[in-house]
Amino acid sequence: MDERLPQYLHRPVQILWFGSDEFLLATSSIFVAAIVGGFVGWALIAALLLFIPWKRTKPRGYLPHLAWRWGLVSFPHYPGPTQTRFFE
């Protein structure tokens, strides 16, 4: 079986001009805004337009680590976000 690797392994995945996490947020926000409509829909679009420039000032991987800190996701073989003492 022939498998292909990207040319640059250190570069993040980019869809159009968004990063992969930005693209997911943009498409889900636009779909929800289209379904909800009205003032709430426009507020979602405005929040998206404010969020993306703010997110681009943060380092890569900021959103998954923020979700980990809030306890929304867990990384396998990593301690929890509230653990302060580590024993090796």
Image (tube, rainbow, N blue to C red):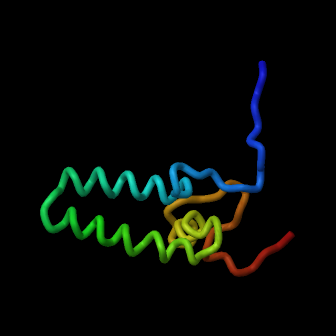
Residue at the image position 74 percent from the left and 42 percent from the top: 6
Q: Quadrant of the C terminus?
A: bottom right
Q: Is residue 51 left or right of residue 36?
A: right
- Where does residue 25 sit, x and y in percent of width and height? 42, 58
As drawn, the residue found furthest toward the left would be 38
- Where does residue 20 sit, x and y in percent of width and height? 55, 53
As drawn, the residue found furthest toward the right would be 88
Q: Does residue 20 sit above or below 72 in this rendering?
A: above
Residue at the image position 37 percent from the left and 67 percent from the top: 48
As drawn, the residue found furthest toward the top would be 1
Q: Is residue 39 left or right of residue 84?
A: left
As drawn, the residue found furthest toward the bottom would be 84
Q: Is residue 87 left or right of residue 74?
A: right
Q: How many marks?
A: 0
- Identify the image quadrant of residue 26: bottom left
Q: Nearer the viewer, residue 83 or 74?
A: 74
Residue at the image position 29 percent from the left and 65 percent from the top: 45
- Identify the image quadrant of residue 87: bottom right
Q: Does residue 1 sit above or below 23 in this rendering?
A: above
Q: Quadrant of the N terminus?
A: top right
Residue at the image position 75 percent from the left and 32 percent from the top: 4
Q: Does residue 87 sit above or below 28 in this rendering?
A: below
- Where does residue 5 sit, x and y in percent of width and height? 76, 37
Q: Nearer the viewer, residue 45 or 73?
A: 45
